[in-house]
Image (cartoon, coloured by chain):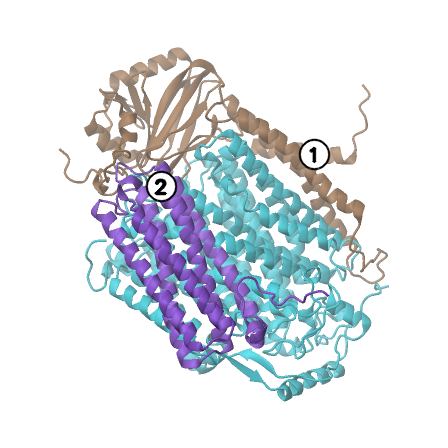
Chain colours: A purple, B cyan, C brown
Amino acid sequence: MKRAPTHSYPGLNLGRRHASADKASEVVTFGFWVFLMSDLVYFGLMFAIYITMIDAQAGGPGPHELFDLTSIFAQTMILLTSSLTVGLAMLALKYNLPRWRIVFWFCVTLVLGLCFLVLEIRDFMSMAEKGGIPQRSGFLSAFYGLVPLHGLHVAAGCLWLVVLGIQLRMFGLTDLLMSRVVRLALFWHFLDLIWIGIITIVYFGGLAYG
Amino acid sequence: MTDTGFLGRLSWDSFPIAGLIQTPNANEIVANAAAAVVIVGVIAVVGLLTWFRLWGPLWRDWLTSADHKKIGIMYIVFAIVMLARGVLEGVVMRAQQAAGPGDGFLEAEHFAELFSTHGTIMVFFVAVPFVFGLANFLIPLMIGARDVAFPVMNQISLGLTVSAGMMLMVSLVVGNFSTGGWTAYPPYTGAAFNPGVGPDYWIWAIVVSGIGTTLTGINFAVTIYKLRAPGMKFMRLPMYCWTIISSSILIIFAMPPLGVAALMLAADRYLDFHFFTNDLGGNMMNYANLFWLFGHPEVYLLVLPAYGIYSEVFATFSAKRLYGYNSLVIATMCIAVLSFTVWLHHFFTMGQSALINAVFGIATMLIAIPTGVKVYDWMATLYRGRIRFSVPMLYGLAFLMLFVIGGLSGVVLANPTVDYQVHNTLFLVAHFHNVLLPGVLFGLLAGYNYWFPKAFGFRLNEYWGRITVLLWTVGFMLTFLPLYFVGLMGMPRRSFSWEDPSFHPYMIIAVVGALVILMALLSVVVQLWVSIRDRDKTRVPVGDPWDARTLEWSIPAPPPPYNFAIIPQVMDRDNFAAAKERGDAYPTPDAYEDITMPRNTAIGFMLCVLSGVWMFALVWWIWWLAALMTGLMLLSFILWTFRLNIEEVIPAEEVRKQHEAWLDLVHSSTAVDRDHETASENRGLARPDLEAVT
Amino acid sequence: MAFPRPLPMSRAMSLAVIVVAATAQMAGASDSFMDPQGPIAAVQKVHLLRATVLILIAVVPVLVLVPLIALRYRRRKGSAATYRPKWDFSPPLEFAMWGVPVVIVALLSFYLWKATHRLDPYAARFGETPALNVQVVGLDWKWLFIYPDLGIASVGELGIPVKQQVAMTLTTDTVMQSFMIPALAGQIYAMPGMTTQLHLVADTPETMQGENTQYNGRGFTKQKFKTLAMQSEDFSAWVEAVRTNGIPLDPQTYRTLAMRTDRDEVQAALGTSQMPDDALYFTLVEGDLFQSILHRYHGGQPLPVDQQPGTVEYGQEGTQ
């Protein structure tokens, strides 16, 4: 017997038990993938700029003086865990667990996201103390053009978590809100993906070649 | 970023009238006249709207509408307003150069502002919105959908594009625009060399319109991928839809480089970063690469939809199937892909190795292959047809003849050897005008004439249409063909003055041509005026005035808000033509159902206004206002997401009533043959014209 | 001689050659590669004409056939022309439509590859060696020519000996510019803190115009200079004249030169009665000026606006 395709949109999905929401999600989720693709080009270009400017340190501090891998490791672990928790929220939605479970996992994700941001800002501040400010060199401009851009995405994701959490409390699980949860989860995984690129290229690459 | 007061760096001297009072000369008079036109224009529009009590309808039916057709029409209105300014600037520039040898009547910096705004406007605020306007109107109609995939996002895109365009208008009245050309190469546009507001106007206009454009690209792509009517397989899509898919793909991948480049330039200017500065490791070559990584796909995202329009026009007015559909699809996709591999040909002269130049030169010439195939496919479409010289067809023929000359100079320019000589000269200017006017603009005007009756329910005046075609064609040839020669003679582009007397005759011919183009623009207005005046004689409510072939012609003109009372079942590439042949072009449906449509919303308009003020505040360093606007934009968007009730239902009964009224009209109308296409008998019901006229 | 009868196509092509050549002649002012004064520009011209003719193979049929088709197949009473509304594909025709452009582009690519390598501005070794070294510095709004081996420099006049190769190294001390002497060779960008190279050679004694083609502000169109190609004895005399009449290009003078001034203004500021009306002559002083200009952007320190030539502020804080 040929298995009927359950979903025509890629990635995370709501599944058959959410028939109408699943159908309504198809177009928006696909659209959101396309948006992420475009956003990915932004990051790809910033990576390229960083690579071309890795030598443009102009006598200023370089990766070895500035990067603190301990903190980066902590941030990585936090962000990876937050991807797990947002995934748990998604599963709670998919399998019709009580609504508070979704909101709970949203809260955990939010806390992790904020912790990540605090650590990242602390990193920037300690870099600045060592003279690592974007005004110092092309290399640092490229760094601050890329890493905070990711941070800004995380901040936007946190804001989205708050807004969507409130909306879930207010309106319950409507079709529209369910599809927003799907998209938020996609966005959050996307942030993780970019971060993997950042630790590999910006931090490890910077230390290896800078 | 020094400390600034309540109004940032805005002061009395920022207004051009201050300059006129200090130094009254021709240059200041031109600047003030331009500012006056903007102010008078705004006052006139406000006055007329008040006089005719149109604020209410404008708000309800247009500004808050999420209907793709209305958004499309607003895009085109905006594009035509901007076109008027762009053409006027072109005429002033031609006049300045024709006033030589010597310095002419404009100051160098003023001339530089003109070529910068002219380029920026024509690319970002004429060609792009015109293309988007037509596509917005047509895509859902052509694929059998009721709206685009994201109607509200569509509205937001329009809002952002318009607010960005308004920045260019504001720059006429307050401060001045960039002098760095539409490409805005640093370090010239950096803070050290250009500390004024000009480049900032450019940056924010580009960034904001770029966001709008990206969202539109996503919207069109998703619409065509996901909302096609049953049976509308990819290889049954009208050619125009294929070109819009390719354009959307180009937008999705090519707009980010522009956004990145402009934002990095902003970081340099506002925050003292060093991406493109001379000192501390900045490198302007990164800018050139980023800009053209966008810039080259950009020209194809403009010209491909025009190719799509020509494909529809040639088929309809030759009364024939489009020749080589598969070939045209393949060629379109080839062009889209190749357009990402050639950006370096915009700076062959930046000192890279001969090997790299040769590779990019050959990649560039490869694009000539699919483009050449297209031209010949269109000729084969005409071949053994029954060609009617209607206005869109005349544009098409002018395009075929003139575009190949632009193609010729394009392939010549692809040779680094020659490019070293003619890069940055008027030869280049002649080349890109030669592809953008006959290629893009003629295509858009052909589309405007072709689909106007669908949008408004009456045909445009043929007589004035033909005059317009003639004027555009003659004007184009007189203005730009001489520039090829002056370019070969070594005259740099963007020259506000020149000395070599041998340039003189060419410059005179070119300014005459520019005046003819100005007349062409006027005749567009006259044509519209005459058409509106005579509209009762040219109404085509049945909806098919040209005996056309695709789905959009199978519905009333103008179409109802929901487009299709019943979503059609598609069975053929030229579905409507096939249905007419079978004799069931206007079937009576068995049953009707409720139709869900997006509700009106003000979010697009809100973001338009807020982003406009936001840009102004950033340009003039009014930080508190910029922060306030950022907050308000975020807040209004978030509040909008709390509105869950975003759709409304049109009851089946109402749909039935409207549709049956129209079907009655269809059955009571007399079908006309193609001999009476332009006569007032043509009510939009076509008589099958398959057998040749004998 | 028994020439084969020319096919209609090749007749069209020879006509095309005539048209192209005629327009090229028409465009041939003295300061253009249409009237080349050196081997590089001459090859560029030939390449342009050859490419044009090859492309015309695809273009001419369009120009001829579109009007013919439009006329023959126009909708009219009693038209005898065939009407095939359903005809939408023909394999042989399609093969030709793809095949002919492929062949033309292949041919063009062959020539492109050859010419691009042969005329590489970094390595176009035309002319006699040893080459004359010239360092070119773009300023707002003039070009400075430094002859490091001869101890002289000039503005407004570039003297070169005929037949001898000229090897140029270019940079700017302001925004990006583009250096071109159309009658001799193509252009190359000059960028701050970086160098580019250009090789050229002149065939005959001639005065040619050189220019900047990249817009850089109000003095842009006046950023022209005369290229004087001279027999070697005349060139020696010119060098001697520059050396005798030139003023020392010390930091103070360079500062005045590098200010945001056009040719007339800088001539008024630095010109002496010994120099021509439209040129400035300098002698070089101790130190490598070209390197110091490049070094300005690699000091590892921020460059204040008043230390950046080409800005409004440069040279304004009192002139000692």
The residue located at (64%, 58%) in the rendering is B242
Q: Position of residue A171 (x, y in %)?
A: 43, 81
The residue located at (48%, 66%) in the rendering is A183
Q: Nearer the viewer, residue B561 or A208?
A: A208
Q: Secondary structure at mark 1?
A: helix
The C terminus of chain B lies in quadrant: bottom right
The reply to whether residue B497 is in sight is no
Where residue A39 sits, quadrant-wise, is bottom left
Q: Vertically, is B661 above or below C271? A: below
Tag nearer the camera, 2 or 1:
2
In the image, B301: left or right of A5?
left
Q: Amino acid at mark 1?
A: Leu
Q: Nearer the viewer, residue B222 or C150?
A: B222
In the image, B597: left or right of B166?
right
Q: Position of residue A59 (x, y in %)?
A: 26, 36
How many numbered discs, if any? 2
Q: Which residue is mark 2?
A: A206
The residue located at (77%, 71%) in the rendering is B579
Q: Nearer the viewer, residue C206 or B196?
A: B196
Q: Position of residue B150 (x, y in %)?
A: 52, 69
Q: Secondary structure at mark 2?
A: helix
Which of the labelled discs sits on residue C15, or is there none? Answer: 1
For the residues beneath circles 2 and 1, the answer to whether they share a chain is: no
Q: Nearer the viewer, residue B340 or A169?
A: A169
Q: What is the chain letter for disc 1?
A: C
